[in-house]
Amino acid sequence: MLKHFAPALLFTLAHSIAVSSFAQPAYDVVEASINEIQSALERGQVTSVEIVDAYLQRIEAYDKQGPALNSIMRVNPQARQQAAALDAERSAGRVRGPLHGVPILVKDNYNTSSIPTTNGTVALAGFLPNANATQVELLLDAGAIVLAKTTLHEYARGITTVSSLSGQTRNPYDIRRVPGGSSGGTGAAVAASFAAIGLGSDTCGSIRIPSAFNNLFGLRPTKGLSSIHGVIPLSHTQDVAGPLARSLDDLAILLDVVVGYDPSDSATAVMQSNPHPQFRQNLTSVKVSGLRLGKLTSAFERSSAAVVDPIDAALEWYEENGARLIEVEIPELAELLSASALIGHEFRPDLEQYLAQFGSIAITDLADIVDNGLYHYSLNQGMTRSLETETDEEAYAAALAARSEVLAAIEQVFLDHELDAIVYPTVTETIAFTGEPQSGSQCQLSAHSGVPALAMPVGFTSRGLPVGLELLGLPFQDARLLGMAYPYAEANSPRQAPSSTPPLQSGLAPALQSFDLSFAAQGAILEGEFEYDLPSNELRYNVRLGNENSAEVYAVTLMIDDEENAGLDEPLVYNLMGPDRTEASGSLFMSPAFRAAYDEDRVYLKVFASGMDVGGVAQRLK
């Protein structure tokens, strides 16, 4: 199977070198919406080939270099060729729709028959399935270009996006932290403007958590609204698949293409009797005034203040504009959710059926994977348990029945309080650092009932970390959820691009900013060199005592001056050098507040030494 991988890799490397020589992208794709791209294509301002190249330049600059997000598994070696064909169609007068010639990203558990589909594991590193996923096929028919496959938490069994094939993916808002999961590669890449929009999958939070962690919109659709055929399963009953987007309009455009009945996915049979939701058409159909939103009290009580503050501010906006908040609880919720979990019952048979159906020869069952250790070590307990657990039909039937109880309990709360949606934090805790577990997921309520849930951005913590609010609706009220979020998004513009992936300059990432520093006061003499790396959000430094220094230097620090505080008595930000040191070097991660102060020349070097007042002496850093 590896023979299929090598040519694609060679092409990708060669093409990467080719696009890096371009002086400047023909069109600035940063934060560009699908509609904006389509308008530029229609006006002849840009071609699809040029759009592809602009995104590839960003991937080259920021995915394996700079902040090294590691969100892209493989670039499609045929992307430019497909873009050229779509340009030719446009020139001939055929435009398939709003996605014609628009590059998209696809999570690497969706089948793509011309690009390996790996599920993030070395076990399937070169696997080429024998058919595209239904959603991929629909999007290709609509004129979309699959630009690349994105990283994921291996086998989709986790929410921090680490795998044996691709390693750890980083969050573009703080590269020290996780991007969420399992669709973390899609989340990070869409946030970084590596394509117009991306596909993810959600068994329990894997669309919504990366959306919340990357300042995006993401819908877990009603079960059966769209097909999961050709998406490597974790639990076919809980699995759904769909987009993560920078705007609700983008989300709606893609959803309108992929929803509907698929004879290859029995769950979508419900769409034979349900009308198409018409997501884009209904974006403006909901008025905030009169909405009744059930605030899930227990979820808020479990949440950290850093998460709750921006969510409360968003809910206050809804109230100010005529919505009503009602405190609600779902009786015996914890017990219902525990009884209705299905991953333990379905993972092994679902995976083995998939491998047989889509032509895996080297790997045919879970034993091939577990016995050979073909997974990230962090998955060991879960993978081993899945292999060793015998099928228990009675327990499985009970878990399936419990899902109906979860749905009934949700529907009863909606009925009792005449609700339009239930609201709660997508994740109750802030984003974890890489290597640490992520706690606080609220994914089960939607996943164990089959009802839709929309994660929407509502702002940032004081440390600049994105926060997501989740809206839970009744079955097939998916479009209404987008409609409820749309007025808030239009009025508050919660979407902000990450600082680690800024617009390219002459086709390249911004250059390092470097400067020297000299300090002399009351016998303390220092010299230093500093570098600011914007994509990495790092301030690197080397400071040392000068040859003429005659003071005992106790500490060298950096501090931020509040613009309204000329006394420079704000708390110290960082220590650069302590007592009994003559030289020190290192790097500092710059928070949004730190970056803003740096850009506004409000960062000061402050020295504490013998002969000085206890408050030390400060001078501007640059």
Image (cartoon, rainbow, N blue to C red):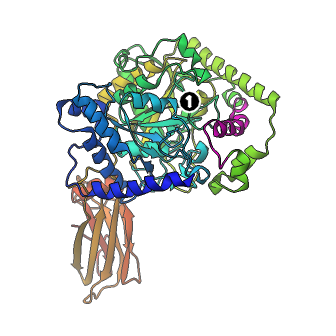
Please say if 295 is above or below 362.
above
Q: Residue 536: horizontal and vertical position, in percent?
A: 36, 59
The amino acid marked with disc number 1 is Ile
Left or right of 504, for residue 156: right
| On screen, residue 183 above or below 475 | below
- The answer to which quarter of the image holds residue 217 is top left
| Magenta highlight on residue 349 | yes
| Marker count (numbered) | 1
Prevalent SS, magenta region: helix
What residue do we see at 47% from left, 42% from top? 114
Q: Is residue 41 visible?
A: yes
* Residue 338 image-quadrant placement: top right
- Please say if 186 is above or below 551: above
Locate the C terminus and report the quarter of the image it occupies: bottom left
Pick whichever, 15 or 317, lies toward us.
Answer: 15
The one of 583 and 475 positioned closer to us in this rendering: 475
Residue, far top: 273
Query: 408 or 116, which lies in front?
Result: 116
Q: Say left or right for 157 vs 254.
A: right
Q: Secondary structure at mark 1?
A: loop
**Residue 195 occupies quadrant:** top left
| Residue annotated with mark 1 | 228
Q: Residue at (52%, 38%) from the top-left corner?
A: 110
Residue drawn at x 67%, y 30% is 337
Residue 540 at x, y percent in the picture = 34, 68
Expressed as whole percent of the image width and height from the top left, the position of residue 299 reads 57, 33
Which span is picked out in magenta?
Answer: 338-363
Q: Is residue 433 visible?
A: no
Q: Is residue 567 magenta?
A: no
In the image, 457: left or right of 157? left
Q: Residues within 10 Å of mark 1 (few under 14, many from 20)?
A: many
